Image (spheres, grey):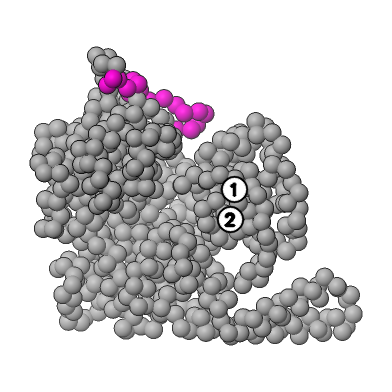
Amino acid sequence: MRAADEFTRQRMLLTMEYEQERKAFRELGDRLGVLRLVDRGKARWPLVVGRNWYNSLNQRVVEVTMEGEPDEDDGFEYGRPVSFFTVEDHGDQKLRHIMTGTVSFVDGARLAVAISDSDDPGRLSVEKGLGIMLSFDETTYRAMFDALDRVAVAKGRLGQLRDVVYAAQKAGELTMPPMRFPYLNDMQERAVNKVLRAKDVAIVHGPPGTGKTTTLVEAIHETLRRETQVMVCAQSNMAVDWICEKLEERGINVLRLGNPSRVNDRMLASTYERRFESHPDYPELWSVRKAIRELRGARRGSDRWHQKMERLQGRATEIELRINAALFGEARVVASTLVGSSSRMLEGMRFSTLFIDEAAQALEAACWIPARRAGRMILAGDHCQLPPTVKCYEAMRQGLGKSLMERIVENKPETVTLLTMQYRMHEDIMRFPNEWFYGGRMTAAPGVSSRGILSYDTPLVWVEASEDMDADASESDAVPQCREEIAGENFGRVNRGEAELALRTLLGYLERIGKERVIRERIDVGLISPYKAQVRYLRRRVRQDSSFKPFRNLISVNTVDGFQGQERDVIVISMVRSNEEGQIGFLRDLRRMNVAMTRARMKLIIIGDSSTLSRHPFYRRLHESVVNGE
């Protein structure tokens, strides 16, 4: 397929996704009450309005705080468009929208929202039943459509890069002697050398626990010995934060565009906004901007007024350009999300090398946004783990979910280096995903291959959770039937009996280890379910059950997506699905199960109904291998 045809097809599929998501958002507020929106992580309500100010980007910002704690995985993060609303009665299905804005900062229950200069933040303080909900993200789609259109007709270096990705020609490679890195293993060393030799593109394929981030940081560090500055991007703010932290630990000057998802002083100090405010010339700029706002408030329209306004605006622009030149001139790494790389602050900037981390989770169009500024691309990730999020089934079926990384892996295998030594999991936990997803090429490092919590423990177990499992149980052992249910209209599935079994199994294991040892050694636990409704039920039960009180700060409960990139000593997976028809829904996306299983270091407990799940060959083989100890 010609590159032009493929870009036309990508644009068509992206349009389908755009229309589906826009329609869903338009109907969301009308179809669901405010409490359901809050429960889904789409809204925060009720709100208390705090102070308002102008930030260093000269945006009017208002601070709002939710009464109570928001859901851990709600969708509020830097850059998301939002809409303020009021609702007199929380049972009312109609929300009255009063003002729009963009999330500027998130810190737990506290949000800072940038609003238009024409909006009055004082209006929010007098509204009753004030809330805020996510709006349709038009900006992200505009950036992706623009990238596809520009790359499709690009000449010069960008056109060459596009043709390398889509055409049959081999990717270019420099000739240079291999470098040695004693602190890396053989495959990590090979990956860094592959990156340094790449003229067009290189892929670092990092399965779970193989040190992909370590390898990528080393590749960036070595590239910076040859280049003045590079760009580093990722799909999510969290992934950008993680790579930035590791780069800063190596002493690399990072300029982080946008705000971090995890609020800490070290990360905030790297942000563009914080460094802009810290520049010696900023107080003068602040004074000039204040004078401009005061002059606008006293607008007269005389020639003298216009002359003064032009003089002040010219002075403000001059200072802004000087501060920007200093900040970008000092930075060795400019880091942002993929969409964030479309920022006007980067207008006209070019980078010899672009690094994209967690590239397998990004839509292809999103990767082309920063690629327009680069001479070559280095992609890192694992296409056997979480795919890009696509909500339109038909667009997914036609291939929108195939990432740029996956395309290059298929078309240009010579650019790929697979990291094979993993440093996270016990060998028994690694064995099945290794065979199914990675062709048996992974090896457990000696330090982890036999590492366990208890002597003579079984690292991987399957606990049966069938519908009739409690029929003969005594009253003290009984749990509700392990049957899946629909949790509200279009709200996913929950299996309360399986959840209770999962919690009882976990508590029993923690008691076997011993409360004092768990706390002393900080043995951490992850409770995972593919279904959000199940996650919410598990979280509520962990908070309610006093038996978990000593361990609560060591237990995380989240979806598979929420655990991407993380690891825990103990992982418990609640599979939820249990029905006579053998329906397993989106558990058919086996990559999610790969992520869930490979979060565990020393103990993995799978709670599931084998009679339902085993109708799928993957789960049948998994169940057999666990039960038979293969």
- In the image, 137: left or right of 155? right
Q: Nearer the viewer, residue 57 or 174?
A: 57
In this rendering, is residue 370 above or below 491? below
Image location (x, y in percent) of residue 409: 28, 59
> Residue at position x 24%, y 24% from top?
611
- Tell me the quarter of the picture where residue 493 sits: top left
Res 250 visible: yes
Res 528 visible: no
Task: Give the quadrant of the C terminus.
Answer: top left
In this rendering, is residue 486 above or below 450? above
> Which residues, given as a range, are shown in magenta?
476-492
In this rendering, is residue 475 above or below 401? above
> Residue at position x 57%, y 54% from top?
110
Spatial separation of the CA atoms under disc 2 and disc 1: 8 Å
Majority secondary structure of magenta residues: loop
Tell me, yes or no, whether the highlighted magenta stretch contains residue 14. Answer: no
Image location (x, y in percent) of residue 183: 18, 72
Image location (x, y in percent) of residue 252: 37, 77
SS at circle 1 = strand
**Sequence-wise, which precedes: disc 2 or disc 1?**
1
Q: Do the residues labelled 2 and 1 touch (CB within 8 Å)?
A: yes
Which residue type carries mark 2? Leu
**Residue 66: mark:** 1
> Residue at position x 26%, y 60% from top?
205
SS at circle 2 = strand
Crowding near pointer 1: few (<14 within 10 Å), some, many (20+)?
A: many
> Residue at position x 63%, y 69% from top?
55
Which residue type carries mark 1? Met
Image location (x, y in percent) of residue 223: 31, 78
Q: Residue under label 2, please give it.
A: 111
